[in-house]
Amino acid sequence: MTKNSWDKKIFVSLTGKTEKDWQTKLKEINSLGLKTVALFLEMFSPVQRQKIYQALEKSSVKHIPLIHIRNDMTLAELKYLCQRYHNPCLTIHESSFGQLDRWIGFHKFLYLEMNYNNRIPHNVALEKIGGFCIDLSHFKAAEEKWAKEFEFIVKKKDKKIFKCNHLNGYSYEKNSDIHTISSLKEFAYLKTLPQFIFGNIIAIEVFNSIKEQLKFKKHIINLLQKN
């Protein structure tokens, strides 16, 4: 795949744990005039999410291709996000299958991110949603210990359900994902991954600044185009 093709697929993300985190990143986004970013809402309470939505409306952001949602989000929130940002991929966890009845009408926009704890809940039913959001470091960790999640994903490799990805760092030493990047070497694992798990929307999921994420993106593109 060409450098330009990867560039169009990989997006920096508005992430964080606190109000200061998202405000700082959004300030960077606005100063750079970025129109397209991914959004990770997993760490934010309903009150914080409303503040984020209001701030985004006044920002340079016009398109959000991927939003990582959380289980306490309402149907009204999903409606708002899908209408405003043109039906983004809404990424969920395995535990989110217990919430599907609350999100009627939006199941086709939901994409599953799997863990690597070697446990898959009985109510996980991929056919009820849009498909997979493969977290690349989770996949690597699951592969290393040949976890149930790895086998579950690989068995689906010939199906056209690999829509999107979360991209973060990986530690070979700990066999775990890394969300605050301290070295570009933490992306080296990407070269070992099979092509079928890569979707058309790849969101960088780290707590680093937008400026750092843009640097990471360039490095990641160079890695992947040589793969």
Image (tube, rainbow, N blue to C red):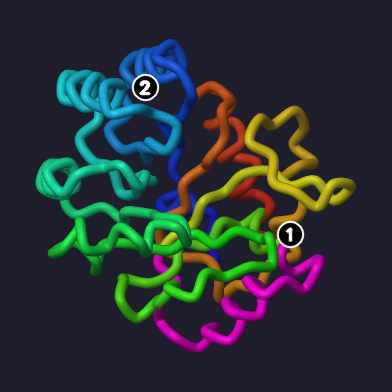
Query: Looking at the rendering, in which quadrant would you find the N terminus?
Result: bottom right
Residue 132, can we see it? yes
Q: Left of 77 or right of it: where is 216?
A: right
Residue lying farthest to the right in this orientation: 173
| x and y percentages locating residue 75 in the rendered image | 16, 49
Is 144 within the magenta? yes
As displayed, is residue 192 above or below residue 157? above
| x and y percentages locating residue 84 in the rendered image | 12, 41
**Residue in the image at 56% along x and 40% along y:** 217
Front residue of this view, candidates 33 and 126: 126
Q: Left of 209 or right of it: where is 141?
A: right
| x and y percentages locating residue 4 in the rendered image | 47, 53
- Give the residue pinned by disc 2: 29
Is 112 within the magenta? no
The kind of residue on which mark 1 rests is Ala
10 Å crowding of disc 2: few (<14), some (14-19), many (20+): many
Query: Looking at the rendering, in which quadrant would you find the C terminus?
Result: bottom right
Q: Label 2, secondary structure: give it.
A: helix
The kind of residue on which mark 2 rests is Ile
**Residue in the image at 43% along x and 13% along y:** 24
Spatial distance from mark 1 to mark 2, Cα to Cα?
31 Å
Residue bounds of the magenta highlight: 142-163
Tell me the quarter of the picture where residue 115 sits: bottom right
- Give the residue pinned by disc 1: 141
**Residue in the image at 34% along x and 81% along y:** 127
10 Å crowding of disc 1: few (<14), some (14-19), many (20+): many
Label placed on residue 3:
none
Tell me the quarter of the picture where residue 32 sits: top left
Q: Left of 215 or right of it: where is 166?
A: left
Counting residues from the start of the chain, the first of labels 1 and 2 encountered is 2
**Residue in the image at 63% along x and 68% along y:** 119
Q: Left of 201 or right of it: where is 208?
A: right
